[in-house]
Amino acid sequence: MAIKDEIIQYSQGIHIDTIGFCDAKPFLEYKKILEERRKRGYYIPFEEQDIQKRIDPSQSLPNAKTFIVIGESYQYNAKKHKTEILKGHIAISAIGKDYHKVVMEKLDLLEKYILSLTQCQIKKFVDISPLPDRQIAKRAGLGFVGKNNMLIHPDFGSRFNIGYLLTDLEIQPDVTNDFMGCGGCNRCEIACPTKAIIGDYSMNPNRCIAYLTQHKGDIEDELKEKMGKQIYGCDICQQVCPYNQSLPNNKTIEPLLDHEMSIEKLLNLSNKAFKDLFGPTSAAWRGKKTIQRNAVIALGNMKEDRSIELLEMMSKDLRKEIKQEVIWALGKKKNEKARCILKEMLDVEQDEALTEAIKTILNESLMK
């Protein structure tokens, strides 16, 4: 049996959902795309800034010959419950065990098995590679890159995570599988609240809600309004994608977080409680403050009276980043209760930037 067939057979035995193989030649065709993205200001801090490192696998592993790419489904149909509790949304990909660990565990087993068959050099990557994950998976036949920039698989849609081994072992590559593509469909482009999806298979990640919920710096007011109730990540472009409409649940997923989480519960979490609840998931890495900041922004986008009560509670928070968003959120309410809370904040606030923000909102409300 050829080594490729042995690897495929073993991958099935350890319940890897999908696997593909491709050569590790430079991604020269992707260089122009990266250069155009940089020119248009479409880079984000999470990305490798050196374009040569992005496109040349040999910079990650000298004498690299082959990518062995795996995909693990995270499809899970979360149940919705009618309730009076104010809730924010957490992306489906983040409600279970941290996908970095899930995929890496499979890669560890795969690496160990390959090394039992032959001597070779191997490097493992899950989401932290300088290389273009989706382009690699596309080349390996795992699907096509859609207009929302997600990799779309014929069986798993876009709801699967990618990981891969880069090796100096030469293995027969698979054929790139574009199967059907997006065609004239533009549902994701229409549905995207911030218009991050442009429709020409490019996107502006700086406007992507999934990125904004992880961004630690200031967020423009216009984008905060479009974030809606998103607390971590965003599923909107995937929810409307035709390829995701009839996917089977991954029965191995055990939700650790609620897809719709109580905002009051979230805002009252201690550091330990946050670590216990979020720690095993991929949503923990940006920390409690960023998640709670997003929850405050969500309150600003809600119409329920209870949202003002929670904002009043958070107006006493000592963290500047939180108070900054409380001020913005109260300014969105445009009612006397919100004005009273802002006046109380103004009486005790020492930070000049925050006091100016409060004064601006109060003055604007007087002029209307």
Image (spheres, rainbow, N blue to C red):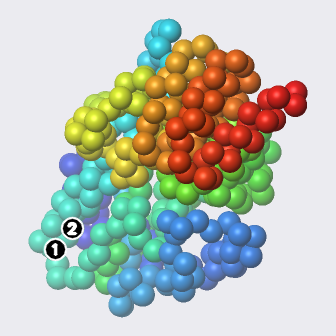
Q: Is residue 136 depicted above or below 281 in this figure?
A: below
Q: Nearer the viewer, residue 140 or 313?
A: 313
- On screen, residue 346 versus residue 48, left or right, reads right
Quadrant of the drawing holding the N terminus: bottom left
Mark 1 and mark 2 in contact (Cβ < 8 Å)?
yes
- On screen, residue 155 versus residue 29, left or right, reads left
Secondary structure of residue under mark 1: helix
Residue 131 in the image: x percent, y percent? Answer: 47, 73
The dot on residue 111 is 2
Residue carrying label 1: 115
Residue 264 in the image: x percent, y percent? Answer: 42, 23
Distance, label 2 to label 1, CA atoms, is 6 Å
Q: Is residue 134 depicted above or below 199 in this figure?
A: below
Q: Name the image quarter holding residue 125.
A: bottom left
The amino acid at mark 1 is Leu
Q: Residues within 10 Å of mark 1 (few under 14, many from 20)?
A: few
Quadrant of the drawing holding the C terminus: top right
Residue 67 in the image: x percent, y percent? Answer: 39, 72
Q: Residues within 10 Å of mark 2 (few under 14, many from 20)?
A: many
